Amino acid sequence: MSESPRQRPVILLVSSRTHRDALEDEFRSRYWRDYDVRTLEGIDGAADAAAALVHDGHPIALLGVDHTLEGDPLALVDELRRLSPSSRRIVLVSMASFREALDELRPALAVGRLDTYLLIPQGPRDEEFHTAIAEYLSEWATTTSGPEVAGVRIVDDGRQPAVAGIRDFLDRMGAPWTRYRPDSPVGRELLAEVGRDAPLPLVAAFDRPAITGATERLVASAFYGSPRDLGDDYVADLLIIGAGPAGLAAAVYGASEGLRTVVLDPEAVGGQAGTSSMIRNYLGFPRGVSGMRLAFRARLQATRFGARIFTGHAVDAMTLGDVHEVSYGDGVLRARSVLIACGVRYRRLGVPALEALVGTGVHYGAAASVAREMEGRDVMIVGGGNSAGQAAIHLARFARSVTMVIRRPSLGETMSSYLVDEIATHDDISVSTRSRVTDGGGDGRLEWVLLEGEHGEPQRMPIDGLFLLLGAEPGTDWLPDEVVRDDRGFVLTGRDIPKDRWRDGRPPAPLETTVPGVFAAGDVRAGSMKRVASASGEGAGAVSQVHAHLAPAPD
């Protein structure tokens, strides 16, 4: 039975009389099956009509506003953002008025008042236009709505902290999931298969045995394979530790150039960048790209060339030799060269009462699945880097209020200016400078935190979600002493290595460590820029140095 229009997400178009028929035909011909396409003529009454849709519970996926409307189209966009902050906002521009419109839209784009502008199609099959529309609808569906088809079923009773990490992992890997209570029909059916007293959470998918007492790493290793599948005699040409931008770029270039390439990561593909809700300054993505989508595409690209990527496997140690051995859990991988691309991890807050609530209101990073649950709630973000800024903007689509807590006097000291400017346009995002969180608690989940400023009494604040993005420290404790690091644990490479560690008076290659055949790229490398683009470039560049190392020595 087909859906009625009232059951579908809404695409709301506000158009002039000149463009109404063309726009309505363009959207209805492509999207009517899955979206309720509604067209309003003129600015008058548009905000009231949108408010009525929101009041009646109709999700507005996309707002398209004709720039040729009489009045102030951008003011209407601002009003619609307040009414439906999770909607994607597009200004539709005619070819005739493009040059004049761009002067007005450019500063609005810079501060995030709208997501993009698009030229109104001039004829049939304007695929560039529809590619942009499809991308925005996809981003809206990924971050805002639940999946239509559940590939993974999770059974829990709401008291298992591990569920937050499992859901975040599945979101980042592009695997749709649905949660069920133990007393639901699906929950009872799955528990009957494994035993009523089986520990929760229970995770089942892909016709594989259900996992009881599931954790993020158990789910990752069960669903996406184990390095043991390669066989005991397998030797990789290039073993990459870490599946962030640097590791994925190295996997693409290494595998495409014929190297037997293997990637290990303890979490989901994408690293910290994979948790970013929207990266707007990455080359080649003028409309921005989410970290999850960027990582998903890079994973497909690497595996297409033959790279083997294994998640849920943390590296414990590395033994050096002509063939290096890397230990993970209960297994060992051998490789002729190793690229350390494990990135950095968020520093811990160090407040015992809040550490005990991780997964039940307290989160390291900003999981998209958790953000959806913050609708109408008050949340706090601790951190002032780009990841924290992106998280604040994303959470503001759902939360009633977002408070950013930083120790410095201003965001501009640690955050890109485009994010600072966009945050300033959000009335529901506030910034508490020279402040820190010192305590918190709740009955089974987070309910309050104690915020301490530079002066004055600590303030107890009711908070439903605390997102911790506290800066970076390298996870390099597993490396042998032969791989030299700086005093913070970042790996030294090339000319940054002390001269007394150079070989034959010559420095190692720019991305090579003190050990021949062991390289480092991305955020874990001392002196790196800590940006997605630079990490990707280093990962790609490391492959040419790996080739030079593996090449036979000249006679």
Image (cartoon, rainbow, N blue to C red):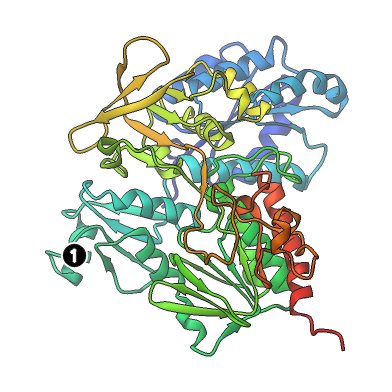
Q: Nearer the viewer, residue 502 or 551?
A: 502
Across and down, in percent, residue 250 comes to: 68, 64
Label 1: few (<14), some or many (≥20) within 10 Å? many
Residue 300 visible in the snapshot: yes
Across and down, in percent, residue 100 comes to: 85, 19
Residue 377 visible in the snapshot: no
Q: Judge left or right: residue 461 versus residue 256.
A: left
Q: Residue at x 81, y 84 (%)?
A: 553
Which of the image's four quarters has the C terminus? bottom right
Residue named by callout 1: 191
The furthest residue to the front? 500
Q: Nearer the viewer, residue 543 or 316?
A: 316
Q: Residue at x 24, y 62 (%)?
A: 213
Looking at numbered disc 1 in the image, what kind of residue is underneath it?
Leu
Q: Nearer the viewer, residue 217 or 500?
A: 500
Across and down, in percent, residue 280 comes to: 67, 37
Across and down, in percent, residue 477 comes to: 47, 59
Q: Judge left or right: residue 153 versus residue 34.
A: left
Quarter of the figure with residue 424: top right
Q: Is residue 117 above or below residue 40?
A: below
Q: Residue at x 84, y 25 (%)?
A: 98
Q: Is residue 48 above or below residue 507?
A: above
Q: Nearer the viewer, residue 311 or 523?
A: 523
